[in-house]
Image: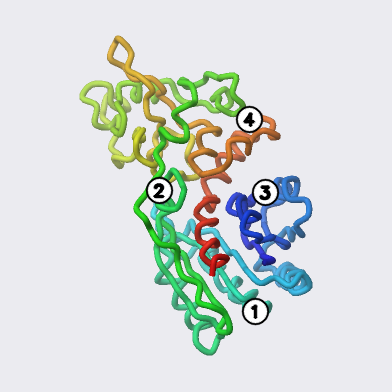
Amino acid sequence: MKALSLFTNVGLGETYLPALDVEVVVANEMLPDRARFYSLRNPDVEMVVGDITDIEVKQDIIRRSLAEGVELIIATPPCQGFSAANTTGDKDDERNNLINDVVDVVKATKPAFVLIENVRGSAKNVLPIIFEELGGRGGYVIREKVLDAAYYGTPHHRARLIILLSRNDKEVWEHPPNDGKTISCRQVIGHLPSLEAGESTPLHFHSLEHKRTPARHSKWLSYTPEGKSALHNKVHYPEKDGRRIRAFGSSYARNWWDKPAFTITMTNGSLSSSHNCCPPHFQNKDGTWSDARPFTIKELTLLCGLPENWLDEIEHTPKTEKFLREVIGECFPPMFCYEIVKVLMDE
């Protein structure tokens, strides 16, 4: 089955699709650096670089998709406007309207199946458009459900609205069942050596030499055990000018070893952001805990469900450190995508 990938980022979600005989033949990404990265790793895919809201870019996507005989569209439009992490309150973010461009491409190409992934907060805005434009006389049967990637082969929680469209002449695409099983942090990153802020190891990308962490943040976290926030420390708590910092309990918070990680966000390198801190490997004699730091890039890729060798051909520089943290924070977890599409291919 030939596929079109819209808002592809660097293609993380597509990683395991070849195992299902799904071939992405056309992809679209607005940001040139992400598009270049994608094309280096996927040289046979026709990459359309540009903003899908530009009519010429959209027509180019449609033309190439029709020429290639695309039967499946995977669309993961940016979701910051609807995200729970959006603290600006800007629900008029222009990116919220990108679902209309997805609808335009679906109408023009009429694929057999469509997968749309977005944050669950987008439901009340996105679903009415999908049902009105593509449901019923629009030619598609629509199934929608919020799923958590942690129950679909992914070692971190990521609740997403998954919309599945099946053309009326095809079998209805249903969501994959949830068997309740999860993968813990320990299972995927427990074998990696302990590491402190600013240090490096011989393992490629298991290093923080290119990620600056304020010493006071690491100190607060060093007194914080597994699964807890430094905000709750009785003595060594986050403070400024002698006063406790007031923040959400997810700030300066450690993950658990025997549970999936919390949602990985674009700010995954900041200890003060949401649940970005590595669980400790051990406790020191002075009572402090090891690994007072954010996850490394190596750990993040494994927690996203990427293969162990995914980073092998990438050079670790300050620039790639920043770039990879951003694209990983916005990714469609690859095993999550695989399990959803697998249902379709098994029918």
Q: Amino acid at mark 2?
A: His
Q: Which mark is residue 34?
A: 3
CB of mark 1 within 8 Å of CB of mark 2?
no
Instruction: Report helix, strand or loop for mark 4.
Output: helix
Mark 3 nearby-residue class (10 Å; few <14, some 14–19, many ≥20): some
- Quarter of the figure with the N terminus: bottom right
Measure the C-alpha gap from mark 2 to mark 3: 24 Å
Pointer 2: what residue?
Answer: 157
Q: Earlier in the sequence, mark 4 or mark 1?
A: 1
Measure the C-alpha gap from mark 1 to mark 2: 33 Å
Question: Residue 288: in sight, yes or no?
Answer: yes
Pointer 4: what residue?
Answer: 318
Quarter occupied by residue 316: top right
Instruction: Report helix, strand or loop for mark 2.
Output: loop
Measure the C-alpha gap from mark 4 to mark 1: 43 Å
Q: Residue at x 63, y 35 (%)?
A: 309
Residue 235 against residue 16 in the figure, above or below: above
Q: Earlier in the sequence, mark 2 or mark 4?
A: 2
Quarter occupied by residue 106: bottom right
Q: Which mark is residue 110?
A: 1
CB of mark 3 within 8 Å of CB of mark 1?
no
Q: Earlier in the sequence, mark 2 or mark 3?
A: 3
Residue 257 against residue 20 in the figure, above or below: above
Measure the C-alpha gap from mark 3 to mark 1: 27 Å
Look at discs 3 and 1 and give the one toward the viewer.
Answer: 1
Measure the C-alpha gap from mark 2 to mark 4: 27 Å
Mark 1 nearby-residue class (10 Å; few <14, some 14–19, many ≥20): some
